[in-house]
Amino acid sequence: MRRKDIVSEGKVKHEVKQKRIDEEKFMAMRKSVLSLWPTGKEVDLEEAVEYQKSMPDNKNFCKVIQKLREEGRTVVFPRAGTPLVEDEIELVQTLYEAGVPLLPCTTDSYTRHLQFEKVEQALEESKKSGRAMLNGYPIINHGVKNTRKVVESCGAAFNPRTSRLSNSLVGEIAFASGMTAQPTSFFPWFGSYDKTATLEECIGTSQYLSRLMGWYADQGVIITSDLHGWLPNGVFPISINVATIIIEGLVAAEQGVKSVLPLVECQGHLAQDIAAIRVTPKLLRRYLDRFGYNDVIIPGTSAQQVPLFAFPRDRGGAFGYVTYTCFVGALGEAEIVSPRSIDEGIGVPTKDAHVETYKAANWINQVVRTQKIKMDNEEIETESKVLETEVTAILEAVLKLGNGDIVIGAIKAVDAGVLDSPFPLNIHAKDNVLGVRDSRGACRYVEFGSLPIPEEIKEFHRAKVAEREKKENRKMDYYAAIDDFWAISKGQLLGKPRK
Amino acid sequence: MRRKDIVSEGKVKHEVKQKRIDEEKFMAMRKSVLSLWPTGKEVDLEEAVEYQKSMPDNKNFCKVIQKLREEGRTVVFPRAGTPLVEDEIELVQTLYEAGVPLLPCTTDSYTRHLQFEKVEQALEESKKSGRAMLNGYPIINHGVKNTRKVVESCGAAFNPRTSRLSNSLVGEIAFASGMTAQPTSFFPWFGSYDKTATLEECIGTSQYLSRLMGWYADQGVIITSDLHGWLPNGVFPISINVATIIIEGLVAAEQGVKSVLPLVECQGHLAQDIAAIRVTPKLLRRYLDRFGYNDVIIPGTSAQQVPLFAFPRDRGGAFGYVTYTCFVGALGEAEIVSPRSIDEGIGVPTKDAHVETYKAANWINQVVRTQKIKMDNEEIETESKVLETEVTAILEAVLKLGNGDIVIGAIKAVDAGVLDSPFPLNIHAKDNVLGVRDSRGACRYVEFGSLPIPEEIKEFHRAKVAEREKKENRKMDYYAAIDDFWAISKGQLLGKPRK
Amino acid sequence: MKENPTVITGTVGVDAHVIGTKVLSRALRDAGFNVVELGALTPPEEFIKAAQETDADAILMSSLYGMAEIDVRGFKEKCLEAGLEDIVLYIGGILGVSRHKFADDVAKFKELGFDRVYPPEADLDAAIEDLRTDLKAKGKL
Amino acid sequence: MKENPTVITGTVGVDAHVIGTKVLSRALRDAGFNVVELGALTPPEEFIKAAQETDADAILMSSLYGMAEIDVRGFKEKCLEAGLEDIVLYIGGILGVSRHKFADDVAKFKELGFDRVYPPEADLDAAIEDLRTDLKAKGKL
Ligand code: B12
Ligand code: B12
């Protein structure tokens, strides 16, 4: 059952540190990766670059976001993928016509586990039965020729989503097919998806894709990497997430990536979320510049609603949460919002649930952005300062640990608990930290573990937590954190104590 | 078919001006009103006062709103009513348990047209068939004894909604049954419901109910009047609505009403809507004080989403509009928001549609109010100033026309078009005015008619409209107004020109 | 054959929703029709009276409050009695209560004698084209 | 009869949703159980191995990603083969894909050999009460 032996970047290994993989090594790695499945042969980098260059601006993820920023618009980035090429074409055309200029290409679970023979069977069955027998688009089995048909079928720019195992080969096929973005994030793998992989292994996998993007960039084709960071499982101040986004950005930049898109997790507190939407790209820019990656573009920002919390299971509450997130994202002037569907708490969303969700989201986005509302108040300012101070302190500690090498630093920082996040899935994470909300719903630390948060900021958190403790006359501990974790699904920001 | 001969206040008339109806006259009027149907005999004012006084604070509309204000909460005020007493009890209990502390009691259409025999038949049929054969609760036929059972069945405070014709008798039965609020608004009747009645007739009807509330107040029982004003049919600056709310407040106060609740129509532009939520109670207070009604309480404010516009007919868009309105109401710190249901654009809402709507609304209200978000920016300030200036100018013009008598002034102002609103239903309204949105979605005048708007404010409107004209390279006229009217239902704030 | 056919508009029964019929009336006027605008809350009999008095070619009725079916029962018959056998009858708006299929409305109101039935948010330009077609067919345009 | 019965927790198959099983494990520990916490992404065989090694009294499995049915087919049989005929088997989480009735999950997983089946947002105190009851019935508490 353990698949640690199968690595998506093939059998050839490189040394994992903050250093560009050298050309020769990279080409050897590519050979190994492309040999994982016959469609790998369809990838011809030179021809792919020509193909990419022949495409108009609306097919380039980076350029589309830059245009959205210019126009002051916010759009939804949905999740979608279906097994057969013809169905996928219909799906992406429908979404594009519904006003979605940026599209994902979500792969299926077999692809994610590199089980390509099973995909073949399932495709056969899908064709025969007329029903989708896979939960996504098997991009590797379909290969470049077929996937180009999908890409060319509508005016959107594409961004595939897949697993760590399949990341490298999916990227090869996707970019050769005209897709122009993909996550190079390694912290989500570590924190949320992969139980036993070390951070070093996760970074290693990620560097391949970044290097591939870098190769395209060298030839003048800008492919965007979206940066997710370590996802907070539950109520937790966002500074670790932001710091790890920046680490991922630096790692991508070193491999030659020229466009990075930070994905900011919105946790429900308006001032904190708007602060994060503003501070994240600002600090990312600062650190990129500091290390000389001045030519790396940050085309915009995406406000995310990754399922951090249990989602409301009633349709009313679900729409409340979805629209609220869009409201905050649009007020924060993010170019993209990524809400979950209203069926999030129930199961895999139906097509209707998808469509209704995006219509509600677009309603809010349009109506809010038209108004160009100025959002500034003391709280946003305070939260911005606190976030900036925390992220800076964390990053400096990481750099120190790595002696200036951000990769080495990150690996050591995880071992030392200098990077830590609650409820991690990975056995190598420390899991010594915890967050709760304060009495106005802002996320605060209650257990700092070994996080390098400056003392005066710790005091700030403690005071806020104490305020709520006094107000509610109970301790803010693990149990309170769990109550807060459930709150959003019950239409509240603050958890009520269980009887 | 014309029912102008049947007047709800019975056959006895009073002189319509800003003067309290004298006791003797009022009692004669009451006798006539109570004789309209046998249950009128159940009303014994002295006993009713004792009954009202025996009830706890949570049954009093005014006190509930004062408490909400203290606690910094926003709640939904729904619409609901069903014919049989037992069913109505079940309904109000369900809503109360769902977290709704203020409940309507919506009457059926037969009651609204004083067709009490038809109600009797329909009640019989409802009992036999087990299906609701009336579209509301026939409060007059059920009478005081039955209705007290409804009022006592849960912890909410009640506020009946009915028509002009039935207004007086419904109030008599409702207050004797322990309900503690009702609209005394006459402008909606004039502007939206009654085609041929003059404003004088509408005010006459309204004064009866205000006097009745005043009578209760004299005995120490505070009954709240909610003030709606002249509802804008379509995109139209809110100043006429606010000015007429204040006129209604003054008329109610003169009759002895001691608690008035302004209902502010939200039109979708955040800065304007928040400005209106703040300015309306402030100006209402100022004018009440100016005329010596210092002891009249304004317990809070309600942010409304009366169906000014065609509503989105798709569920996603409907949830977008509903939650957006709640968001604005909660940011504005209104104690009540009154969104329409998500089925508004479709037809009479199902029970599920009601429940889902209120759950979404409450999600937003709770999450936003917990945060105590400070909303202040230049635009809100500008819109507040403009609104205050306009409303003051309009009210001063009305008072001048009436030589200090606000009732006479209002009647003359309507004839002169000094009070006017687009797309009126009433044949006596001038209909010489029009509104459109500016390029950021704020409602502006394009045709001022005879409205007494100060010249510099007119210039402000003209400049904003010109800006949009330039941007869109088309004239902002009747056709643009119609495009804007449809926009909200299409997920936009600004209408797009029809091809 | 007329250049400017006369048409009657209004909402029927005790329906107070006036905006739609106002918009429709203006569109008809802009399109060159002679419009007799009865406004909201118009009893069915008044439509017939107005049609007789103005020798109208069509009635374009609106209803939004869901009770149109009851309001217009027997309307076609009354038109015939009043000698309006040739008049074009249209109705539009929200013609039923609660969620329901528009196709059912069409069937129901055609049965009740209406020539054409329009859904909410109907495209008025298309409706006016329909009207021209129907009037031409009857030799009235 | 034990004072601190031993229970095994974890999410089965390739399900990575670890939060629920972490919360459940802590609640069990707080309630005095001896908890062997296997965490997320645990193959079915590992549950059995752990149960054998620790002489466990119950397995409380979680699954949220909708594919539990496939993961636990034949699990009861393997328990029997491994000599765990007496072990209490619970499962909870989101046990099917898309909108569906929880009652169907209950039927399905009881059929597959589980003693009790829990819905999303299940009340853990109640579940622990159930566990005590079942363990008592088997003379294990
Ligand atoms: C605005 C409005 C009001 C305003 C009306 C102001 C006024 N005097 O006009 C006010 C607040 C007063 C109001 C009151 C009520 N309303 Co109202 N209202 C609406 C609302 C939101 C919009 C209606 C509207 O103006 N649409 C815009 C206009 C331009 O569109 P339209 O009328 O459909 O017309 C267009 C087309 O349909 C077409 N068209 C129309 N007629 C015809 C005819 C022909 C021949 C053709 C070709 C085309 C055509 O042309 C127009 C332009 O494109 C609708 C819900 C919705 N649709 O969003 C509810 C709605 C119509 N109202 C409703 C109800 C129940 C009421 C009340 C009974 C509520 C109450 N208990 O107080 C009262 C009724 C009063 C009465 N006696 O009729 C219900 C009707 C339910 C049903 N059908 O099952 C609705 C659907 C809301 C709901 N879901 O409950 N309402
Ligand atoms: C957080 C989350 C994630 C996080 C998980 C972080 C982590 N490592 O734990 C991340 C982002 C990584 C994630 C990833 C994915 N997710 Co996810 N995720 C969620 C979400 C929002 C919340 C889950 C959660 O933590 N709930 C809170 C915990 C405390 O509750 P719980 O686990 O249900 O447990 C409670 C009870 O059920 C009970 N309980 C649980 N087990 C047991 C057992 C017993 C015996 C008892 C008595 C009680 C009990 O006790 C707990 C406390 O009360 C849900 C949707 C939702 N429910 O809101 C989707 C959801 C579970 N995810 C889903 C999917 C599809 C995925 C992905 C496949 C998405 C993708 N394509 O990337 C991946 C799967 C990765 C994998 N291999 O499993 C789907 C599953 C679909 C289905 N069942 O039909 C859901 C339902 C979302 C959706 N609607 O699509 N997800």
Image (cartoon, coloured by chain):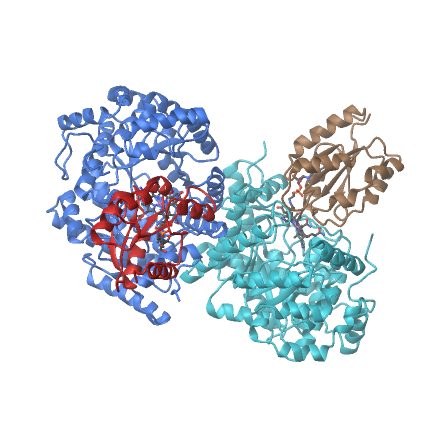
Chain colours: A blue, B cyan, C brown, D red
Q: Residue at x 75, y 45 (%)?
A: C39
Q: Residue at x 78, y 25 (%)?
A: C141
Say left or right for B385 vs B377.
right
**Camera-side residue: A182 or A55?**
A182
Q: Residue at x 19, y 43 (%)?
A: A199
Asked if B402 appears above or below A21 in the picture, the reply is below
Question: In x, y percent, where is residue B189?
Answer: 71, 57
Question: In x, y percent, where is residue B377?
Answer: 43, 56
Give the image quarter of residue D22.
Answer: bottom left
Asked if A328 appears above or below B250 in the picture, the reply is above
Give the image quarter of residue A473.
Answer: bottom left
Question: In x, y percent, where is residue A436?
Answer: 32, 60
Q: Which quarter of the figure is the C terminus of chain B placed in?
A: top right
Say left or right for D64 vs B265.
left
Decide if residue B403 is in sight here. no
Q: Residue furthest left?
A: A403
Asked if B61 appears above or below B327 in the picture, the reply is below
Say left or right for C116 vs B266.
right
